[in-house]
Amino acid sequence: MTILTVALLQIEAAGYDQEENLARGEVACRRAAALGADIVLFPEMWNIGYTFEAGPPGDLERWRTQAVPADGPFVTHFRRLAAELGVAIVVTYLEEWPRAPRNSVTLVDRRGDAVLTYAKVHTCAFDEPEASLTPGDRLPVAPLDTAAGPVRVGAMVCFDREFPETARILALEGAELILVPNACPMEENRTGQLRARAFENMVAVALANYPASHEDCDGHSVAFHPCAYGDDGASRDTLVVQAGAGEEITLARFDLDELRAWRGREVWGEKYRRPELYGRLVEDRPGG
């Protein structure tokens, strides 16, 4: 078996205190590496703990000023840490961007190289402060070198997972693993969505959420594999692991050999699609 271990960092942040978030994040990464993680996954927008601090007039502008560049000290710190520890780190942050910031993820390999940066495509435009963000415009997938071997990885951020098209495109681009930084309650319906994304696309999925001590979150970081039936044809539970409500580092272990064998022989994913019938999915008009 080739086991890939993803550490889900269900840890509390310190709001706009980015130095403290950096320090807490480093401690968690070191703990995860000591536990045997190959990939370390932060919850959404870690540099400010997905926080919007209310204050005097102009607090939205104050929030925007918390944005950091993708090549700045915050992300660079975790690149150096990844190289030191020999683990991949998925760092999340409010990213500086022309006109308005982005909600971004940078995937750093175990040598400290940034192999993928993804900006949340489905921003929560119905609510401030996300309504002021610049949405991402691409769904990239990249090969990631890990101690367990190479794996093709894509990302979704929180609300992205509620759109089946997001995971499907990542799967069509060759993703074997989708990593999901999150910052909202992971109740039964949302957890069920994630289970479906794994099954219907034949991909492994891992989500890191904030603990219940964080506003509007409830913990329950979770991971699923897609291998829904055993060799005897009996149904299997595709849940890999699920955290509780409090702070913890949860390890999700995926058997890459099993995953790849499943993708090679089973009928879901891309094999029997009828894309010539799916044009309605990309038509920009209201439903009727």
Image (cartoon, grey):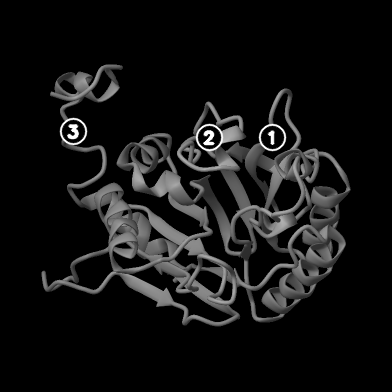
Front position in the image: 269 or 28: 28
Residue for badge 2: 140
N-term mark: 3 or 1: 1
- Dot 2 alpha-carbon crowd within 10 angstroms: few under 14, some 14 to 19, many 20 or more: some
Q: Which of marks 1 and 2 is in front?
A: 1
Query: What residue do we see at 45% from left, 74% from top?
Result: 220
Which quarter shows the C terminus? top left
Q: Which amino acid does label 2 sit on?
A: Pro
In contact (CB < 8 Å): disc 1 and disc 2: no
Front position in the image: 68 or 105: 68
Residue for badge 1: 101
Front position in the image: 152 or 219: 219
Residue 93 shows which numbered tag? none
Task: State whether residue 259 is above or below residue 250.
Answer: above
**Which element carries disc 1, helix, strand or loop?**
loop
N-term mark: 3 or 2: 2
Where is residue 244 shown, x and y percent of the image? 47, 82
Query: Does any portion of residue 164 appear in the rendered image?
Result: yes
Q: Measure the C-alpha gap from mark 3 to mark 1.
A: 37 Å
Task: State whether residue 22 is above or below residue 127.
Answer: below
Which quarter shows the N terminus? bottom left
Q: What residue type is labelled 1?
A: Pro
**Which element carries disc 3, helix, strand or loop?**
loop
Residue for badge 3: 273
Q: Which of marks 3 and 1 is in front?
A: 1
Query: What residue do we see at 69% from left, 34% from top?
Result: 101
Q: Which amino acid does label 3 sit on?
A: Arg
